[in-house]
């Protein structure tokens, strides 16, 4: 019988689709990357989603976030994403948590029972915290690197963080993870050189980029707000979702599935 996931089933088979439906994936951060990752996972048939983000939708989100429209301005991102997912799949199990992910909340927000974690957070300390938490639990994770200041979506790829180049965030992640003894991390990153921001920048504290002004953050506590566009962060999210879905459906990465 045809249904909303019958085309997916043609690719992954009934067993793969059943595995996806039984899975629960946490998506941390619902910006341009995370919102598209969450939607792609829901449309692929992932049955359980834990959504974590403390922000509300603002005007500057409209150019790249799937949940950001005039009608949703001011709405908490987790609520908008939950409503959108349930409109796609009313049977989905959605746990929407309007909280800030960080070292102090990692243990509570990422717990046992998860099938996968998608890290779409934009602060270094939180990214490190979720990697360490996922590794401690034995939960697979894919982490998004810097999607800002990029214009070429064809340069986005998934790889191990230790095989990345160009990306400033990936460089700092490699250094910190090596220091902490983490020898592998699946990431989505771009090989494109960052484009210089045009016009005057703003203090990143007012744009949610690095509110803690971390000393070792790639932005060094202050930088121009990164430029973004409609077709690069979503590709990061789609690639992250593909890593998760292929792993959960047990399709070898790099297989011949169109």
Image: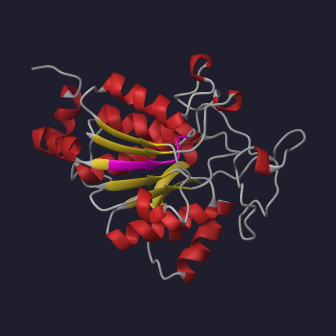
- Rendering coords of residue 197 (x, y %): 81, 44
- Rendering coords of residue 60 (x, y %): 70, 31
| Left or right, residue 152 beside residue 92 | right
With respect to residue 99, does 213 lie above or below?
A: below
| Left or right, residue 198 beside residue 179 | right
**What segment is highlighted magenta in the picture?**
25-30
Q: Taking the image as drawn, is residue 204 in sight? A: yes
Q: Residue at x 47, y 32 (%)?
A: 79
- Rendering coords of residue 128 (x, y %): 54, 67
Q: Residue at x 54, y 65 (%)?
A: 104
Q: Residue at x 67, y 46 (%)?
A: 148
Q: Main secondary structure of the magenta part?
A: strand
Q: Quadrant of the N terminus?
A: top left
| Left or right, residue 244 beside residue 17 | right
Q: Quadrant of the C terminus?
A: top left
Task: Tell me which corner region of the image, top left, top right, bottom left or bottom right, holds residue 215.
Answer: bottom right
């Amino acid at each position: 019988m045809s249904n909303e996931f019958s085309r997916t089933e043609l690719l992954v088979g009934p067993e793969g689709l059943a595995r996806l439906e039984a899975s629960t994936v946490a998506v941390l951060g619902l910006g341009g990357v995370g919102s598209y990752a969450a939607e792609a996972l829901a449309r692929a048939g992932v049955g359980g989603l834990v959504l974590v983000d403390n922000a509300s939708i603002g005007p500057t989100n409209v150019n790249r976030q799937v949940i950001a429209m005039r009608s949703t301005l001011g709405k908490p991102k987790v609520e908008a994403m939950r409503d959108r997912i349930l409109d796609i799949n009313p049977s989905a199990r959605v746990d929407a948590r309007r909280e800030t992910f960080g070292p102090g909340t990692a243990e509570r927000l990422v717990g046992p029972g998860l099938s996968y974690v998608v890290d779409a957070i934009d602060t270094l300390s939180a990214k490190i915290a979720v990697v360490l938490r996922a590794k401690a639990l034995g939960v697979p994770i894919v982490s998004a690197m810097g999607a800002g200041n990029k214009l070429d979506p064809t340069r986005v790829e998934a790889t191990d963080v230790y095989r990345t180049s160009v990306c400033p965030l990936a460089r700092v992640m490699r250094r910190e993870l090596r220091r902490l003894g983490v020898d592998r991390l699946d990431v989505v990153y771009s090989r494109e050189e960052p484009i210089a921001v045009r016009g005057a920048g703003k203090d990143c504290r007012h744009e949610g980029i690095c509110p803690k002004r971390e000393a070792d953050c790639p932005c060094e506590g202050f930088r121009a707000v990164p430029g973004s566009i409609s077709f690069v962060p979503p590709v990061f999210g789609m690639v992250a979702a593909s890593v998760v879905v292929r792993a959960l459906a047990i399709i070898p990465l790099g297989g011949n599935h169109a």
